[in-house]
Amino acid sequence: MGTVEIRNVRKSYGSHAVMHGVSVTIPDGEFVALVGPSGCGKSTLLRMIAGLEDITDGEIAIEGRVVNDVAPKDRDIAMVFQNYALYPHMSVRENMGFALKLRGMPKAQIEERVQVAAQILNLQSLLERKPRALSGGQRQRVAMGRAIVRDPTVFLFDEPLSNLDAKLRVQVRSELKQLHQRLGTTTVYVTHDQIEAMTLADRIVVMNSGQVEQIGPPLDLYDRPANLFVAAFIGSPPMNFIEGQANADGTGLHLANGTSLPLPTGAKAPSGRAVTLGIRPEHLDVAQTGWPATVLVIEPTGSETQINAQLGDIPLRILIRGRTDIRPGDTIHLDAPAKHVHLFDTHTGRRIESQFPGD
Amino acid sequence: MSALLSPIKKRRKPRIGRYVRIISGVFACLVFLFPVFWMVLTSFKMPRDIFTTPPTFIFAPTLETYTSYFFHADVPRRMFNTVIVAFGAGLVSIFAGAMAGYALARIKLRGAATIGVLILLSRGVPPIALAVPMFLVARNLGLLDQHITLILAYCTFLIPYVMWLMRGFFKALPAELEEAALLDGCTRMGAFFRIIVPISMPGLISTLIFSVILAWEELLFALVLTNRNASTIPVAIAGIAGDTVNGANWGALTAVGTLTVIPVVIFALIVQKWLIQGLADGATKG
C-alpha cells in the first residue's frame, strides 16, 4: 500500500515560515499533481516527502509509517528530478542499476530489471551510452528508468518535463500517463504547468504561498473552483473576472466606473454584496444581444479563435470554436449560460455557492 | 551602405582580438619559461661557459655537473625523501581537505562560512612563526628528521588550500546528484565517495598537482625539521646556493634544479588525462 499522508506539515527557514500547515492524503495508486506558481511550496513539499528537506512541524507518513526522521534511502521512494541528475560517470545501464546494486541484489536480477525497464521506455539501444551522449528526451527517459527499476512504493516527479521542448513534452506526458496506468504506483507530481496537471493527475492539489487552496479531480477544479486563486490558475486561457457590487435584486452589478452590468439571464448574485463574477473564455458566446464589447485583437489558432475585447474598461477574452469574420474594432454582444457563471466574494475570494439554477 | 559594411567589420574584429590573444599568450609563455630554459641550458655548460659575456647559446654540452653533483649533493636519497614527503602530504591533504571542503559546501552547519574563513585565515600566519614551535614540539616528541613530521607540517598549509579550492568545486556541482544518490540508497559518505569523488576527478587531480608542487618546493620547514635522513631536495639546493666557503656553484645549482623539476613534469604529464574538463557533462539538462 503506497499511501502517503501529509498531516499539518509546516516549514520554516529560521523565522521565515514558507509552509503553513498543509494536509493531503494520497491513497495507494493515485496520481496526484501539486501545482501552483513559483515559490508556492510545491517543490518543498515534494522534497519533504523524499526526506531531502526537514519538516519543521507536522507529520508525513508513507504506508502508515511516520517518516519524519527516516533517511531518504529508507523511505522506498524514487524521484525524478527536473534536471534529471543522472550520474555522469556511469552508463545508462549502471545509472539504472545503481540503486539495486546498493541493495546487494544479484547481478542477474539487476540485469533483468534493467532490461524490463529499458523495454518499457524504449532504451535498449542506449544502455551502454554515457548521459552526455544522450539527447534531453533520452536523459529524461533514463531518469524515469532509474526510478522504475526500483519498483518503489511512491514515485516523486519534480517538474520532469520542464526542460523538454513543447513537442517532446506532449509526447513524454502521454508516456508518463501510460506508465502510471501500467504500473499503478502512487505518484506525486510537481508542476507549474496546469495543463500537465490537468491531463495527468487523478487529483490536483493547488498550492499558493505555502497553503493548499483546493484539492480535487481536475475537472472539479475547472468546473467549481473554490476561490479566485484557483479560478484564475486553472484553465487556459484564464478566466475573465468582473468586480462589482450586486444590485438589490441580484440580477446586475454596479461596477467601479459607475456603470451597471446586467448578469447573464438566470444568474443571481447575493444582493448588495461585493462580488467578482468569473466566466471562462470558452463559455462566453457571441450573441445577438448581451454585453456590448469592442474587439481589440483576433488570435486564430486554426481549431479555435481567441478574441480579446474590451467591455467598458474591463478586458475580456473570448474563445470560440473554428474561425470568425469578426474584425478588430467591431462591436460584439456577449452572453453566457447562467450555469457557467462563477461568483466569488471579492473580499474573501471564496466561491459563493448555489446562486444559479444549473450550478 | 553601412548596413552592408557592418558584417565585414564584425568579422574582422574578432580576428584582431585573436592575434592579440595569441601574441600575449606567446609573450607570457616566453616570460615564464625563459628562466626554466636558461636553467636547463646552464646545467649543461662547463663553468667557463656560464659567465661569458655576451651569454652564449652555442657551446659544447657536458654532463659533468650532473655526474659530479649527483652523489655529492646526495640527490638520490633527497629525491626519494622529497617524493615520499610531497606525495604523502599531497594525498593526506587531498583526502582530508576534500572532505572538509565538501562538508563546508554542502552540509548545513551553523557557522560553516565562519569556519571556512577562519581556516583560510590560518594561511595568513607566517610559516616562520610556526617553524620554531614545530621544531620544539618535534624535538620533544623525538620526531625530528622523519618523513611523517614533514608530512604533518606540510598538511598545516595544504589542507586549508585544498579545502578552499574543493569547496568551490563542489559548490558548482548540481546538488541533485547527491540527492539522487541519497534516494538510491547511499549514505552521505557513500554519495560523496561513489558519486562526487568520481565526477570531481579533474578538480581533485589539479588540486593534488598543485599541493604536491607546493610540498615539493617547500624549504623552510624542511630546513628546520630535518637534518640528514629526511632532508629534501630544496634543502640541497639551498646548501649549494648558500655555500659561503666556495661561493654559489651555478652549474651544480642549475643541474640539481633541473633534476628537481623533471619528476613534477612527469607526474603532471601522467595525470593530465584526468584533467579533461567536462566530466560532469550530461549529468543534468542538456
Image: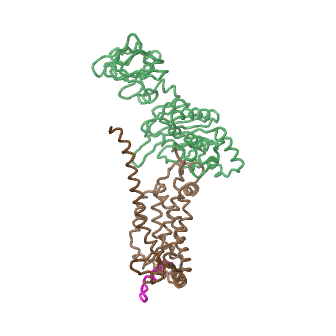
Chain colours: A green, B brown
Q: Residue furthest right?
A: A108
At 67% from the left edge and 44% from the top edge, which residue is drawn?
Answer: A114
Q: Which residues are magenta?
A: B232-247
| Rendered location of residue A286, percent (x, y) | 41, 14
At 49% from the left edge and 21% from the top edge, which residue is drawn?
Answer: A303
Q: Is residue A184 left or right of residue B19?
A: right
Decide which of B4, A292 is in the foreground and name it. B4
Residue A63 visible at all: no
| Rendered location of residue B1, percent (x, y) | 33, 37
- From the image, which quarter does the N terminus of chain A lie in? top right
Q: Is residue B81 left or right of residue A261?
A: right
Q: Is residue B241 highlighted in magenta?
A: yes
Q: Is residue A345 left or right of residue B214?
A: left
| Rendered location of residue B118, percent (x, y) | 40, 64
| Rendered location of residue A34, percent (x, y) | 50, 36
At 48% from the left edge and 76% from the top edge, which residue is drawn?
Answer: B257
Decide which of B95, A57 is in the foreground and name it. B95
Looking at the rendering, which quadrant does residue B112 occupy?
bottom left
